[in-house]
Image: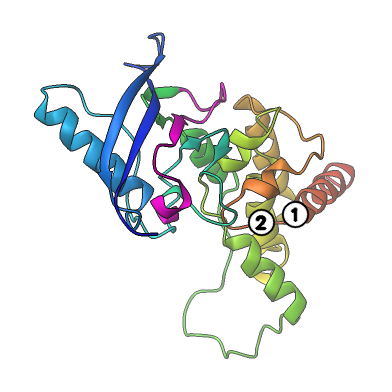
Amino acid sequence: MSGNMNLTLKVWRQKNTSASGTFETYQASGISPDMSFLEMMDVVNEDLIKQGKDPIAFDHDCREGICGMCSMYINGRAHGPLKGVTTCQLHMRTFKDGDTITIEPWRSSAFPVLKDLVVDRSAFDRIQQAGGFVSVNTGSVQDANSIPVPKENADEAFLSAACIGCGACVAACKNSSAMLFVSAKVSQYALLPQGQVERAKRVVNMVEQMDQEGFGNCTNTEACEAECPKQISVSNIARMNREYIKAKLFS
């Protein structure tokens, strides 16, 4: 694609958690197709600042698809129309000149809007904290082969650990379920020898904290996996359910 684009943005603006929000319309002019979505937002904000207006608040940090901060609901999809990318990895060449783009925050009572497109995702932090610690031996470094791990388990644990906690699974789910996120964190340790000591306690505590935070339940529509930028598998949810049932039965 060559040449710059002119776009119309319909952006959700909300002063704080208790205020009522509304969509406001902005023009994004002279946008290079090589810009990332966040760079386009930067350009729009620079124009707003020049006009003496309040810039659009949105989360960002690494801008490399690692931190999970760049959470935007773009044209009805978490992180936008492409599969397996975060908002910061979405480039403007995905859109066409003259397009109208609707941008919203995550919609979940467990993720209250702080301002505009920024939501409070500290519920995820509390769920992870409920998981507690992992008991490991300290002292000299163990021999690399002293704790054999089947390759299948190692691969599954690695894929689960790829979860960046962005919350796209919650945003995509009709029930605002966090089960894909929680199950990825549970699986990460349940599959490895280092996670066995607290295995039962961990899954019970994390699931119960998830429920306390007000997330909904899973009804297996698999929207979470479809919208996850790291393509975490819903098979983790089945694993977490098995882990939870065993923990409750034998506790």
Q: Which mark is residue 232?
A: 2
Q: In the rendered view, does 149 fall on the left or right side of 132?
A: right
Q: Quadrant of the N terminus?
A: bottom left
> Measuring 68% from the left and 29% from the top, which residue is drawn there?
211
Near mark 1 (Cα within 10 A), the count class, few <14, some 14-19 or many ≥20, is many
Distance (Cα) linking label 1 and label 2: 8 Å
The one of 68 and 7 positioned closer to us in this rendering: 7
Report if residue 109 lies within the magenta region. Answer: yes
Give amino acid for label 1. Asn
Q: Specify start and end residues of the magenta stretch as a single range.
A: 89-112
Give me the disc on residue 172.
none
Is 156 part of what is drawn in magenta? no
**Is the stretch drawn in magenta largely helix, strand or loop?**
loop
* Element carrying mark 2: loop
- 113 left or right of 164 in image: left
Residue 35 position, x and y percent, is 32, 54
Residue 121 place in picture, x, y as percent: 47, 35
Image quadrant of residue 244?
top right
Residue drawn at point x = 67 percent, y = 67 percent: 157
Residue at image point 59% right, 62% down: 161
- Image quarter in which the C terminus is found: top right
For numbered disc 1, what is the local secondary structure?
A: helix
Residue 7 lies, with reference to residue 212, above or below; the image says: below
Residue 178 image offset from top left, x and y in percent: 65, 38
Rate crowding at label 2 as few (under 14), some (14 to 19) or many (20 or more) other CA atoms within 10 Å.
Answer: many
Task: Work out whether residue 67 or residue 28 is closer to the camera in this orientation and state it.
Answer: 28
What numbered label is drawn on residue 236? 1
